[in-house]
Amino acid sequence: MVPIPEIQPGAEANSPDGSRSPAIVVITGMSGAGKTSVLRVFEDANYFTIDNLPPQLLDKFIALCLAGSEASPSYTGMAVVIDIRAREFFEGLLDSVIELKNAGYDVNVIFLDAKDHILVRRYKETRREHPLADSGEQLIKAIQKERTILASVEREADFTLDTSNLSSADLKRHVMSYISAEREKPKTNIRVLSFGFKHGIPLDLDFVFDVRFLPNPFYEPELKSLTGLQKEVGEFIERSPDCSEFRKRLKDLLTWIIPIFSEEGRLRLNVAVGCTGGRHRSVYLAEKIGVDLRSKGYPVNVVHRDISK
């Protein structure tokens, strides 16, 4: 067994060399709705693809792909079809997907559907047997049975596509649009601003954190003329046990809230850190917040408004 690495909330899945891991797409839905055709589109888009994977092996498959990449993966992502052909194993799909998402992996579920009469027609044209059809049973009964089993999966899907009236070319265009949208999904940029309260609170902020509870280097003669960018000031501030605890709690808060902002389409998050004059404590903490967030893969710009005042 190959353990799949856990990713902290807000972090991106990384391949062994530290680069961002490919996206993971689970294709599921009604039999006859076009899952194999959709999988071919992902394959053409340079995704590593597998058809009819048991859901209990999904995490093992991902772990093997990541562990086997000695350099940046040559493929764009991973796409797997998991459907009712897995029979009694299929019920583990949602649990597997939730486990991966909770571990921080970029997993999306695509659910394909079609009207019942369309599915009946497609099966008659291909003369294939429905996976749930019992001997002598009407095809519509098997379709209805499958729809009942898949109801909970459809509710949790990230993207649902009805293929009833789509030609092969139309289906390919829809899927390629989905792939392009995922590749080009904008990332929230973060600006961390240090400031001094005596110079006024900046405008257009999302969060303001007051660090005046920390020891003030201003009252230390050898530190007064320095700034939070210098080692001596940082060492003085770090002597306070409240500093490390504040950093930890703030990091947890921001790495939890940033993905929520991203999902809402917010392209910029403004975080301000204030002390009395804006030269020592706020500068030091702003720099450290920048380091903490960059370590999680976020684009961060640190600005010190009052450092020269």
Image (cartoon, rainbow, N blue to C red):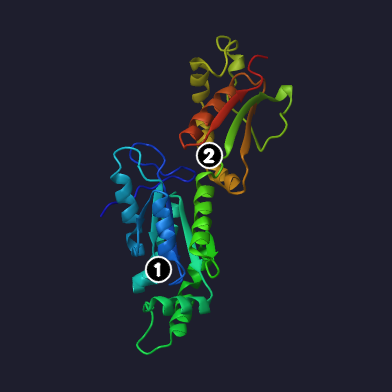
Examine the image and state in which quarter residue 16 appears. top left
* 268 lies left or right of 170: right
Q: Residues within 10 Å of mark 1 (few under 14, many from 20)?
A: many
Q: In the displayed structure, would residue 286 be above or below residue 137? A: above
What kind of residue is marked 1? Asp
Determine the CA span between mark 1 and mark 2.
42 Å
The residue carrying mark 2 is 249
Quarter of the image containing the N terminus? bottom left
Name which residue lies at 35% across and 74% down.
Answer: 87
Q: Is residue 167 above or below residue 176?
A: below
Looking at this rendering, what residue extends furthest in the left direction?
1
- Residue 220 in view here: yes
- Image location of residue 32, percent across then percent down: 44, 72
Residue 189 image point, x, y percent: 58, 36
Q: How many marks?
A: 2
Q: Secondary structure at mark 1?
A: loop
Residue 135 is situated, as x and y percent measured from the top left of the image, at: 34, 88
Residue type (three-letter) at the residue carrying disc 2: Arg
Residue positioned 34% across, 65% down in the render: 52
Q: Which numbered disc flags the more N-terminal residue, 1 or 2?
A: 1
Q: Nearer the viewer, residue 61 or 78?
A: 78
Q: From the top left corner, tell me how far across and down residue 26 is, in percent.
A: 43, 59
**Quarter holding residue 149:** bottom left
Q: Residues within 10 Å of mark 2 (few under 14, many from 20)?
A: few
Q: Which residue is mark 1?
A: 83
Residue sitting farthest toward the bottom: 136
As rendered, which of 60 and 40 lies closer to the eye?
Answer: 40
